Image (cartoon, rainbow, N blue to C red):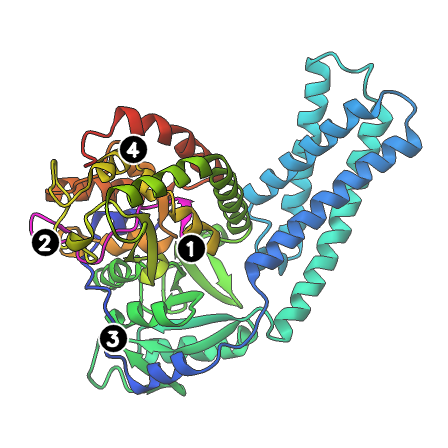
Amino acid sequence: MYRVDAKQAVLDHVSKQGAAGERQLSPEAEAIIAAPVERTLSGAVVVGIAQVIEAVLLAGLGYFIFETLVAIGEAEFYVPVILASCLLANVLFNAARTHRIVAYRTLFNQIGRVLVGWTLVMTVLAVGIFFFKAADLFSRLWLLSWFAGGAVLLVAYRLALRAIVMRWTAAGRLRRRTVIVGGGKDAEVLIEQIRASANNDIRLLGLFDDRVDARSPDSVAGSPKLGKVADLIEFARRTPIDLVIVSMPLSAEKRVLEMLTQLWVLPVDIRLSAHMSKLRFTDRAYSYVGDIAVFDMADRPISDWNLVFKWVFDKVVALTALILLSPVMVATAIAIKLESKGPVFFMQNRHGFNNELIKVYKFRSMRTDMLDHNAVKQVTKDDPRVTKVGKIIRKSSIDELPQLFNVLKGELSIVGPRPHALQAKADNKLYYEAVEGYFARHRVKPGMTGWAQVNGWRGETDTIDKIMQRVNHDLYYIEHWSILFDFYIVLLTPVSLVSKNENAY
């Protein structure tokens, strides 16, 4: 089967992005930005709650059957097995992509995948009981009853969930803010199809198209043209966007690739509409927006239930670190005050998620009269601007500890691409000028530590190769993110501070 591997094509052809400063947008785009954003239900929240309820129902059923029907074994054996089985079920249901708003709207596809996943869970449980010779501890009646009862429960639950989601969809409570890239007749047909089958799922804001001739009028099927594709980057930074649909034929490979390489930096779902394609693929190749077949070109890096995992991980680790490291932070503050006059903390503007400006907190490590708020000149070895205390806290990264407060505020994550100063340079070039696709690293929240840092790419970036290595590691992290990956990086961070700090001054 022919397969469009867009992600790899983008990675091979990532284009250079412009500066993160605001572009002058059209009056129509500015009007949309200024308008209040309509309140809708978050798909991530709906999916997260749905998963929790499903797991609780399955666990409750398993324990109820044990208490009412089974006389063999002890609860201390059943409870951990029930919880582990429900966790495995959740993992398999997610792997089968059944916990998504789009999946909730389906009927046979959703239920079929859920039942296959539940059967696999019960098979693993049965094999585990046999392998560990624990048949005397667990009742066969309980196992069979939980399997059958769980299957009935899952079918009933998914039918109820589908009814609720369809009702919310019809009421427009799950609509995604969407823009179309492209124009002309292709976009006109796409807009008509959206209004016919996906109007309750899509809140169409407008179109972006680089063409300025008669093929791309200022309004298509009543939807305004908001600017060029490059303007979409700034537009998405200033107002929420959930979905971008590229309206171009697959035959226009060069144009499609050019669009994707510009849009790849956005933290949104990107779909290529198949409505004008004469090629026909198997059903597995498509996903759907309403009844419109689309190709999944890029997904939001961290979405749905993973956002909840990431949020909890950040808050728990930040609070724990603040408690454990508070003596170090207090001692550092006292040392800074004793050595030189001036504030204890230093605040600097950095680029955050989706290129938003944030103020990052640090312990002051430079002399007050030599502070460099824009980081025009990087700190080098034996830099006269750095105080004696500053050398110690910079080398050990203690100066970064106040950023735990940025994490609690939701501006940073514990793990993610490090936020760079706005005017930071490598070989006299601003980072975004030196590295192609630089702003793609802002598709997730920046972090206090990251994959680049634990691999030795921290500290001075005086050459283009160093900043390229850092960006490549950041993009690898984004593409391969998991909560276990975050745990791994956190565990490696103290080790890397000792073994890989030769570039930290």
- Sequence-wise, the earlier of marks 1 and 3 is 3
Q: Indicate the secondary structure of the residue bearing disc 4.
A: loop
Query: Which residue has dot 3 on it?
Result: 228
Mark-to-mark CA distance, 1 and 4: 34 Å
**Quarter of image, res 253:** bottom left
Q: What amino acid does circle 1 point to?
A: Arg
- Sequence-wise, the earlier of marks 3 and 4 is 3
Front one among 160 and 357: 357
Query: Which residue has dot 2 on it?
Result: 429
Residue drawn at (45%, 65%), measured in percent from left and top? 242
Query: Which residue has dot 4 on it?
Result: 396
- Sequence-wise, the earlier of marks 4 and 2 is 4
Q: Indicate the secondary structure of the residue bearing disc 2.
A: strand
Front one among 341 and 411: 341
Residue drawn at (19%, 37%), measured in percent from left and top? 505
Residue range corresponding to the magenta coloring:
412-431
Query: Which residue has dot 1 on it?
Result: 300
Q: Is residue 45 shown above or below 498?
A: below
Tell me if residue 324 is in the magenta stretch: no
